Amino acid sequence: RAFGLPVHDWLAVAENVDAVLNECARDGVLLRDLGYDGPILPPQPASGGIDFDSLPPLSAFARPSERRLILVKGYHGWAGRALHALSAVRLAAAHLRDYRIRILRPAPVVSEMAALIAESGGLDIAPASWVPDHAAAVRRMGEARMMLACGISDGIGTTLLEAMSVGAWPIVSDTCCAAEWFEPGRDGHLGSPHDVAGMAEAIRRAATDDALVDAAA
């Protein structure tokens, strides 16, 4: 199967496609492997990207090393794996006592797990409050030291672009194309969505290494 369709159906669709616009360069290779031989346009974020003219300058935010907020993408279902991210948070709890951990749009099961972690791990962890517009969401991201997004499939996540734009250290899954946008280990962490222990170590590192997060920003 490819892109939700059986391969034979995809090939039939490909014969009638005039051009393709992807988020990731890697997708062009996949399309060619599926038999598409038409033009492939340069990659572009599906969201349109970040309008830096509308953002405060990075200097308007606190240095990442001074921030004490962690944001976690709360989707858990077909692709999202927020429960894996919260498991990693629990493993790294000893290093997160001074942090507020807020979950963005958590699924009900994710909120339930967060409540258990708050009780068992002694962490300040809860669903994030609703914000009225995108500008407010980006300003909140600018208060975060790090952002966690765990999933088994993604392109260039909008949350990742928002985090990079305001200096929040991204911890994301290698199932997205983040490596086309930052250098893993220097500008953010890229790892398997199934490697909870590795994610926990990435969280610990970002929580304790001030020089790392400041240099990335």
Image (cartoon, grey):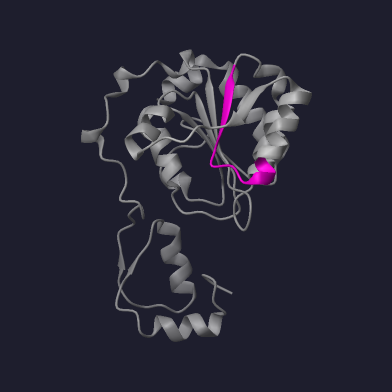
| Residue depicted at x 41% and y 77% | 36
Compared across the picture, whether 61 is left or right of 207 comes to left
Instruction: Determine whether 27 is above or below 190 in the image.
Output: below
Viewer can see residue 198: no
Compared across the picture, whether 190 is left or right of 197 comes to left
Instruction: Determine whether 63 is above or below 44 in the image.
Output: above
Q: Residue furthest right?
A: 120
| Residue depicted at x 41% and y 45% | 158
Of the 4 image quadrants, the one containing the N terminus is bottom right
Residue 202 in percent (x, y) is at: 62, 30
- Is residue 103 on the magenta stretch? yes
Segment tinted magenta in the rendering: 99-110
Residue 14 in percent (x, y) is at: 41, 81
Residue 151 in percent (x, y) is at: 59, 49
Residue 186 in percent (x, y) is at: 48, 30
- Is residue 211 on the magenta stretch? no
In this rendered view, identify the residue nearer to me: 52 or 21.
52
In this rendered view, identify the residue nearer to me: 21 or 78.
78
Of the 4 image quadrants, the one containing the C terminus is top left
Viewer can see residue 63: yes
In this rendered view, identify the residue nearer to me: 24 or 64.
64
Q: Residue furthest left?
A: 53
Image quadrant assignment for residue 87 = top right
User: So how many labels did they put on this image?
Assistant: 0
Compared across the picture, whether 59 is left or right of 91 comes to left
| Residue depicted at x 46% and y 31% | 187
